Amino acid sequence: MAVSEALRNYLEEKLNRHESILNHATSISGEFNDHVASRGVKADFRLDLNVVLPKAVVRVEEEGEDMYSVVDKAVDTLIRRVKRYNDKKVNWDGVTPWKDIEAMSETEEVAEEAIDNYINYVPKIKHRIKLENIAPMGEAEAIERMELQGQDQILFKNVQTGEFSMIYRNGRGEYCLVIPKNSV
């Protein structure tokens, strides 16, 4: 959506208030979206914020009726997650380097291509993420990375087994681990 100067200044002002917390960020990007076709619903506006930190990427997505309140909620969530990153990064550097977090920052989204044979296929893949240079990590590190990115699941190479595993958060907020029965 076309962003007004006032809205851009409002977001920059909110982020500048927390400059001391965001001082390690290598880049901060934001994308404003509006859903013109669905006016009057609670998800009229959407703000996606991405903050690239030395060993992590923090992503926040917020939706709402008023863009200014969406900015407020998104910045509050972002600051909470960056504070958590700042608290935990001391442990990461001393115990196990998270090289795979750096790999996640290098992921690229591949555009969805329409394939003639599968036009009528109902489930469609919206985003594709290519994971490269996946370094092994422990289950606790995978959960922490998942939380920082604001996701509900993460695929990782388990340091204990050497196999790919997946951790996800179920509807009750519990963490679940999926491990392969046979190697692929």
Image (tube, helix red, strand yellow):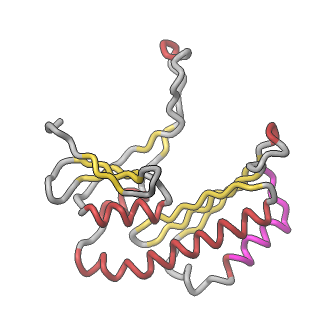
Residue lying farthest to the bottom in this orientation: 20
Q: Position of residue 82 (x, y in %)?
A: 51, 75
**Bounds of the magenta span?**
1-14
Q: Residue at x 51, y 18 (%)?
A: 121
Residue lying farthest to the top in this orientation: 117
Q: Residue at x 54, y 67 (%)?
A: 51
- Judge whether 15 appears above or below 137 on screen: below
Q: Position of residue 181 (x, y in %)?
A: 16, 39
Q: Position of residue 100 (x, y in %)?
A: 31, 60
Residue lying farthest to the front in this orientation: 172
* Closer to the camera in the image, 54 or 147: 147
Q: Determine if the magenta segment contains residue 26.
A: no
Q: Residue at x 45, y 54 (%)?
A: 172
- Judge whether 87 appears above or below 30 on screen: below
Q: Is residue 41 left or right of residue 180?
A: right
Q: Position of residue 141 (x, y in %)?
A: 31, 66
Q: Which corner quadrant holds the C terminus?
A: top left
* Closer to the camera in the image, 171 or 84: 171
* Closer to the camera in the image, 123 or 176: 176
